[in-house]
Image (cartoon, grey):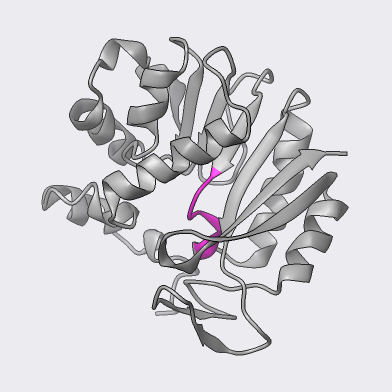
């Protein structure tokens, strides 16, 4: 059987992990640290409680449990490949579940963002494109640009590397050119974001597991 492009696409991946109570672990671990970093990055980028946030690949609400408490009620939206993973996060991780309508957590397997309103101001995809080939980043950016005309800031993370098949990142994880976790050439990512209607900046600060932050705004 061919290797799936992402470990999250393995048969029964979510069912097996959730049955073992691993809803935090399967989104990358380092739960509290990474969630704090995510909300801090968004606030540094200008996110305020009145803004509408889309958390792409929200998983079990590592960011969502913090963002739903910070934003005005109704202003957080999340999408993920697994509805069961999001539902587990909603049951287990929210200090005040009433602040997040479960209908704002939307299963999405192709960056179509079904049901997400067009008035999204901020969007973040943290540790999403590290597990997908570059073609999926291109598709996602195209969709985001088309769907959210009011978008002020898009934040996403990637791994970068020299022109090598495999590369050990500063945080220790080994990334690859042709399988997950994926790395890309920095200029390749900048060119792609420009081609899909964004101007982008890569930031020097290394995030957990050696990820690089990219911030993008519509042209």
Q: Is residue 168 left or right of residue 116?
A: left
Q: Would residue 62 be visible to someone looking at this image?
A: yes
User: Is the residue 215 above or below the residue 190 in the image?
Assistant: above
Q: Which residues are magenta?
A: 125-130
Quadrant position of residue 119 = top right
Q: Position of residue 147 (x, y in %)?
A: 72, 30
Q: Quadrant of residue 118?
A: top right
Say which residue appears at 48% left-offset and 55% top-offset: 127
Which is nearer the eye, 99 or 91? Answer: 99
Residue 80 visible within the image: no
- The quadrant of the rendering that contains the N terminus is bottom left
User: Percent x, y for residue 29?
Assistant: 28, 56
Q: Residue 122 appears at what percent x and percent y?
A: 62, 30
Task: Name the quarter where the C terminus is drawn.
Answer: top right
Left or right of residue 123: residue 76: left
Residue for point 77% across, 39% down: 217
């Amino acid at each position: 059987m061919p290797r799936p492009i992402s470990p999250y696409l393995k048969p029964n991946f979510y069912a097996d992990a959730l049955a073992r109570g691993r809803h935090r672990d399967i989104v990358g671990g380092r739960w509290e640290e990474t969630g704090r970093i995510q909300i801090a990055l968004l606030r540094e980028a200008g996110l305020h409680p009145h803004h509408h946030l889309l958390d792409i690949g929200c998983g079990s609400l590592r960011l969502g449990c913090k963002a739903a408490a910070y934003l005005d009620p109704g202003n957080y939206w999340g999408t993920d490949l697994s509805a069961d993973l999001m539902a587990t996060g909603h049951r287990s991780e929210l200090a005040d579940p009433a602040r997040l309508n479960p209908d704002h957590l939307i299963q999405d397997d192709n960056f179509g963002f079904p049901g997400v309103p067009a008035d999204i101001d901020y969007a973040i995809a943290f540790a999403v494109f590290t597990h997908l080939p570059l073609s999926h980043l291109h598709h996602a950016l195209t969709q985001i640009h088309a769907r959210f005309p009011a978008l002020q800031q898009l934040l996403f993370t990637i791994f970068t590397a020299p022109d090598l098949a495999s590369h050990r990142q500063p945080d220790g994880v080994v990334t690859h050119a042709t399988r997950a976790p994926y790395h890309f050439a920095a200029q390749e990512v900048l060119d792609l974001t420009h081609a899909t209607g964004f101007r982008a900046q890569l930031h020097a600060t290394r995030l957990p597991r050696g990820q690089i932050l990219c911030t993008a705004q519509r042209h």
